[in-house]
Image: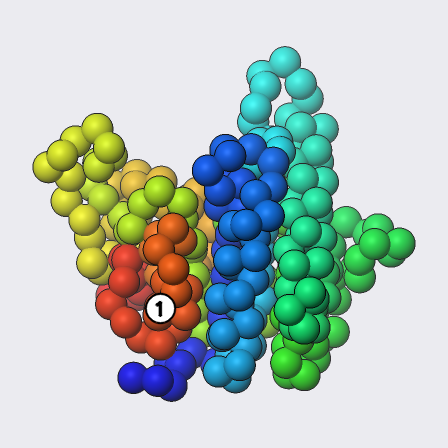
Amino acid sequence: MTEPIYKRVVLKLSGEALAGDKGHGIDIGMVTKISNEVKKLQQLGVEIAIVVGGGNFWRGRSTEDMDRATSDYMGMLGTVINALALQDSLEKIDVITRVQTAIEMRQIAEPYIRRRAIRHLEKGRVVIFAAGSGNPYFSTDTAAALRAAEIEAEVILLAKKGVDGVYDSDPYINSSAKKFNTLRYIDILNMGLGIMDSTATSLCMDNRIPLIIFGIDKPNNIVDVVLGKKIGTYVKEE
């Protein structure tokens, strides 16, 4: 199969994915690799929105001594740094990109406006959503589910570092861990699998947005998933 099976996708990238093997900060080589895969998707005619995390700089729950809202806002700023790095990398390979932030910072990015985002996608531009949902107490996974619903994306691609799907236990600890090829949203909630937080999972379930969880370490996985190859774990309605 050489034709994509999805027309409009949301790609969720964790901050850890952008850190590569460094574990923190930004690994330019990894960012370049991801950018090249995004360009391949664009050349196939896929409309691509990206939601980035910020865990390579700061996690909202990193410290119990700090006010939770303040800590979450710091995490949102980390996502903006990642978004700008990814935008720069994409534009160096001639992929027109727009960053939209849920917290207004007009000097460096557009504010998030749903209709404008959709118009960018229709024109073939990549749109990167930064600063999560703009609200503390909500993860970037929830932001990915929210933006996917708003722009009517057909699927959310959860690109994970170090895993190739969803298992019933940690495969690094339990050599007998079982990988799931398919799951239902309710299974994620009932089994506490930790793919996404419960708010994000419920939002996907309510809006019937499929999820595909796969590893980002293997070259071309992002493209292969959109081409319909059986990679990772597929989550859908019953």
Residue 214 location, quadrant: bottom left
Say whether residue 53 is visible. no
Please tell me how crowded label 1 is: few (under 14), some (14-19), or many (20+) other residues with Cα within 10 Å: some
Q: Residue 69 placed where, x, y %?
A: 68, 30
Say whether residue 159 is visible. yes
Q: Residue at label 1?
A: 225
The quadrant of the rendering that contains the C terminus is bottom left
- Looking at the image, is 18 positioned above or below residue 91? above
Q: Is residue 198 left or right of residue 89?
A: left
How many numbered discs sit on the rendered protein? 1
Furthest toward the right, the residue is: 107
Residue at 72% x, 28% y is 70
The quadrant of the rendering that contains the N terminus is bottom left
Q: Is residue 156 left or right of residue 49?
A: left
Which residue is more in the foreground, 83 or 71?
83
Q: Is residue 102 left or right of residue 161?
A: right
In the image, what residue type sits under mark 1?
Val
Q: Is residue 184 left or right of residue 51?
A: left
Residue 236 location, quadrant: bottom left
Residue at 71% x, 58% y is 88
Which residue is more in the foreground, 211 or 192?
211
- Looking at the image, is 40 positioned above or below residue 177? below
Residue at 35% x, 76% y is 227
- Looking at the image, is 227 positioned above or below residue 171? below
Residue 57 location, quadrant: top right
Residue at 15% x, 39% y is 177
Furthest toward the top, the residue is: 65
- Looking at the image, is 169 positioned above or below residue 8? above
Q: Residue 190 placed where, x, y %?
A: 27, 43
Label 1: element kind: helix
Q: Residue 151 placed where, x, y %?
A: 59, 71
